[in-house]
Amino acid sequence: MTTEIRERRPRLSLLCFRAVAVVTALLAIGQPIFIGSYFAGTFEALGLHSAGAAALQSIALLLPIAAGAVVAVRGRWWFLVWSLVLFLLIHVQAILGYTRVLQVHVPLGVLTVGVAVAVAIASLRRGAGSPREVRA
């Protein structure tokens, strides 16, 4: 009788992380679109930008949790690191926007969108589900 040792891999946790990462990226991409519409004269878009910020902050709470689940089943540890970075960026970004510190809010927004998209793309790559090696 042969005993087959199953390798632990992030499957469900990775699927959840991917979903949260993609939604985060889409919401982040929407932010400059909404504020651009506001600057173009659609004044209701400022409300959408504000609501988008609230939604982004809410979903950002789930990102490190989902990444922690991936790491717990031997997934990529850097998902957790970049999820925490993105979580902090989003919250600092919102604070700067609500306090109207726009000279920092705008360039930090560019960085936030870039990091959100990069995390989403990295989570969707084929190697994202490969378990990390355990060091002896």
Image (cartoon, helix red, strand yellow):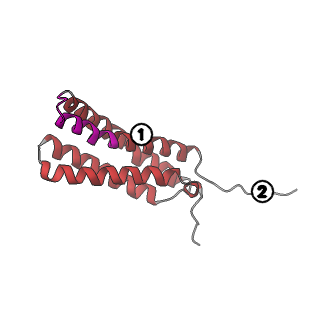
Where's residue 126, x and y in %?
58, 55
Callout 1, which amino acid?
Val
Q: Which type of secondary structure does the marked residue at label 1 adopt?
A: helix
* Residue 75 is one of the magenta-drawn residues: no
Kindly identify the residue that appears in the image at 44 percent across and 49 percent down. Answer: 120
Outermost residue toward the bottom? 136
Kindly identify the residue that appears in the image at 46 percent across and 46 percent down. Answer: 66
Kindly identify the residue that appears in the image at 57 percent across and 58 percent down. Answer: 127
Outermost residue toward the top? 44
Callout 2, which amino acid?
Glu
Say if mark 1 contacts mark 2, CB within 8 Å.
no
Name the side, left or right, on which 78 lies relative to 88.
right
* Residue hosting label 1: 23
Compared with 95, 122 (above or below) is: below
* Residue hosting label 2: 4
Q: Which type of secondary structure does the marked residue at label 2 adopt?
A: loop
Nearer-the-camera pick, 119 or 80: 119
- The dominant secondary structure in magenta is helix
- N-terminal label among 1 and 2: 2
* Magenta span of residues: 28-43
